Amino acid sequence: MAVGEILLLGNPILREKCSPVKHISAEETQTIIGHLRDTLEDFRKRKGFGRGIAAPQIGVTKQIIYINFEYTGALINPKIIKRSKKKFRLWDDCFSFPDILAHVERNYSIVVAFLDEQGKRKQLAAEGALSELLQHEIDHLNGILAIDRALDSKHIILRSEYEKLAHKLTGAL
């Protein structure tokens, strides 16, 4: 198992625009995919949540994301080719700032074109939670973080405060 160190908010690599992968079958590319998979699984075991990770989060500025939610595998050079007009809002979190949540607006459905781990061209139609996850991870490849997508500065909150508020609301019902 090759678990990478997850870079945290403030690390300049998280703000870099990633370059496309040219050689999918190259050992370097396959190693990055393995590191992403192993790091995601390790995070899930330790924290109890996590659905996806992008290469810059482990210090690699290549256009690769790895997800394990409704679809499992690497998406290489992913591009959103279609977005719904319908949008929804949610509290988004991130491995790179696990104690912060940002209230964001995302497209309800998207279509993503990408190359799989074997270099085959694919498209993935996603809606709801999978759509949000893909938008979040693809943003990482462009140096955009969930806090950049917050509705405004009042829509960024510490996870501990969010949980207190949620507990008060559910306790009041």
Image (cartoon, grey):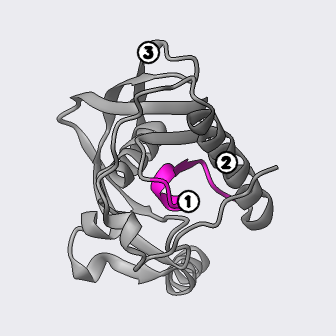
Q: Is residue 165 above or below residue 66?
A: below
* 145 in the magenta segment: no
Label 3, secondary structure: give it: strand
The residue that label 1 is drawn on is 58
The residue that label 2 is drawn on is 35
Label 1, secondary structure: give it: helix
Give the side of residue 92 with respect to residue 103, left or right: right
Q: Is residue 57 above or below residue 124?
A: below
Q: Residue 138: x and y, percent?
A: 37, 45
Q: Is residue 70 visible?
A: no
* 57 in the magenta segment: yes
Q: What's the mark number on residue 130?
A: none
Q: Residue furthest left?
A: 85
Q: How many marks?
A: 3
Q: What's the mark number on residue 122?
A: 3
Label 2, secondary structure: give it: helix
Categorize mark 2 by other alpha carbons within 10 Å: few (<14), some (14-19), many (20+).
many
| Pair 2/3: label in front | 2
CB-based contact (under 8 Å), mark 1 and mark 2: yes
Q: Which residues are magenta?
A: 49-60
